[in-house]
Structure formats: C-alpha cells, structure tokens
Image (cartoon, grey):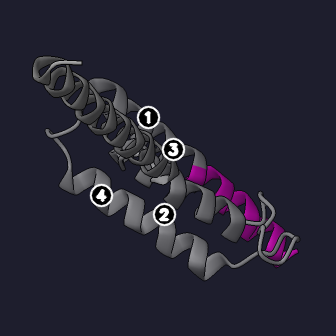
Amino acid sequence: MDIEGVENESWKEQAAKEKAKLDAELKAAKEHQANLPPEPTFTQFITGLTAQALMALGDAENPMIKKRELDLPQAKYLIDVISVLKDKTEGNLDEQEQGALSQILTDLRLRFVKASEKSKN
C-alpha cells in the first residue's frame, strides 16, 4: 500500500469517528429536548390558574389529596388574579385569547356564586 492510500484511509477513519461523535451528540441533544417542558404560553398559564380555581370551588378533584374541597377565599383570590391579568393584558392579546379569558372569567364567577349559595345552605 502506498502513502497516499494510508493517508486516505486515516482521513476516512477520522471522518467516520467525527460523524459518530456528532451523531451521538445530536441524539443526546434530542433526548434532552424531549425531557424539557413545553415553552410556556399565556393560554397555558391561564389554564393552570383556572384549574386551581376549579379545585378551590370544589368542581375539580385536587390531585394531591385525591378529593374535592371547597375553599371560597382561595377561589375568589384566583378569580381576582385572572381578572387582573385580563385587565393588564387588554390590547396585547389576540381576539381568541381575549375571548377565552372573558369566557373563563364569566364561567368561574357563575360557579363562585353557585358555590357560595350552596355553602350557605
């Protein structure tokens, strides 16, 4: 085998090693990315607050204690927080986000009134 053949062979081996290394790094990066939570959105944030309010209203089970509990002060607080967010984001949300936020607040407020009436009886 001549020197040129040896140089070509070592170059090919080196290129194959680098490719294998890059492939492994890419695979590790993809696995890491798959384990990351999704990018936060305003809708996801509001959905989380809504879920908490529903739990406080006793309309959803608290997954930590596996039961429903009524906590009207907490429910009122969460509804007020969502209302503040609606007011502070006015003009910065798209039409769909603004409509969803209004609908969520209307629903939560109605549920709060019903829960308050039930707790008095």
Q: What number is the disc on residue 85?
A: 4
Callout 3 crowding tier (Cα within 10 Å): few <14, some 14–19, many ≥20: some
Q: Residue at x 18, y 21 (%)?
A: 8
Q: CA distance from mark 3 to mark 1?
A: 6 Å
Give coordinates of residue 62: x percent, y percent. Answer: 77, 69
Quick one: SS at disc 2? helix
Q: Residue at x 42, y 54 (%)?
A: 45
| Image quadrant occupied by the N terminus | top left
Residue 84, picture quadrant: bottom left
Instruction: Determine whether label 4 and label 3 are within 8 Å by CB.
Output: no
Instruction: Relative to 1, say whether 14 is above or below.
Output: below
Q: Which residues are magenta?
A: 108-121
Q: Residue at x 52, y 57 (%)?
A: 48
Q: Is residue 108 left or right of residue 5?
A: right
Earlier residue among tags 4 and 3: 4
Instruction: Determine whether label 1 and label 2 are within 8 Å by CB.
Output: no
Instruction: Determine whether label 3 and label 1 are within 8 Å by CB.
Output: yes
Q: CA distance from mark 2 to mark 3?
A: 9 Å
Question: In terms of depth relative to the viewer, which is nearer, 103 or 96?
Answer: 96
Main secondary structure of the magenta stretch: helix
